[in-house]
Image (spheres, rainbow, N blue to C red):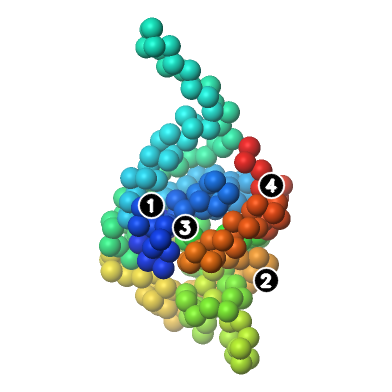
Amino acid sequence: MKTVILAGGLGTRLMEETVVRPKPMVEIGGRPILWHIMRLYAAQGFGDFVVAGGYKGEMIKHYFLNYRLFSGDLHIDFATGHVETRDDCDVDWRVEVVDTGSATQTGGRIRRLAPQLGRERFFATYGDGVADLDIGELLDFHKRHGRIATVTAVRAPVESRLLPCPGAGIADPSADGAPRWVNGGFFVFEPEIFDYIDGDADALEQTALVKLARDGELMAYRHEGFWQCMDTLEERRLLEGLWASGLAPWARVRGLTPAMD
């Protein structure tokens, strides 16, 4: 299965960082958060990625193009012009970076990837959030209910990415002040998802997910564990602190550790 990572947005609420680089390239522990997300999937057996680029997407291409070079040593013989890389590459991923447009919405980005995804089931997630999520369990849940789409629901005291709860398999009569179920990303989609997206202007959250819920084709997988997005500098500092402590929950899934090597 392929994993789509939505990595093309402007990241306006993190403008101090994103004015010079795309949000998924903002670093946690010296590595882009994009790398952390991909490690989470790859460590659980899903290492085939399609990155939906847009804003400053050339920086994402440059990162992966030179990944092996920067992960090891470089030997240059100036007398002969011979160049040799001696790398110790720590990944065996397959990565495709696709320019899905600088102004395209999240649903439109997925629709633009139809040629790369074909008529197969696929994962999708945002390029700005991490979790201690069991990807295999998420996939098993999706297979059991047999609908077109699964969204991972998380409890977070925020108002963004709210779930279209009716028909999504969860009720949300939140108590006053209590955290609500919100869209944490980490989707599983059947290829029929493309029928629910009309074009570039369609936001996944306000169009496709709402229509899927209306048709009874959306289910929510409840994740009670760790989840954190990186929308602000404060949230970036939180993630950075967890990584530096050696206790980053997303790095401890199935043997991942916060080590750089």
Residue 149 percent location from the top left of the image:
50, 68
Q: CA distance from mark 1 to mark 2?
A: 32 Å
Residue at 53% over, 78% down:
158
Look at label 3 and name its amino acid.
Gly
Foreground: disc 2 or disc 3: 3
Residue at 56% over, 32% down:
89
Look at label 4 and name its amino acid.
Thr
Give the number of callouts.
4
Q: Secondary structure at mark 2?
A: loop
Q: CA distance from mark 3 to mark 4?
A: 20 Å
Q: Which residue is mark 3?
A: 127
The quadrant the C terminus occupies is top right
**What label does residue 224 carry, if any?**
2
Foreground: disc 1 or disc 2: 1
Foreground: disc 1 or disc 3: 1
Q: Return the disc, 1 or 3, that comes first in the chain's sequence.
A: 1
Q: On the rendered structure, is 93 left or right of 247?
A: left
Q: CA distance from mark 1 to mark 3?
A: 13 Å
**What label does residue 257 carry, if any?**
4
Q: CA distance from mark 2 to mark 4?
A: 21 Å
240 and 117: which is toward the camera: 240
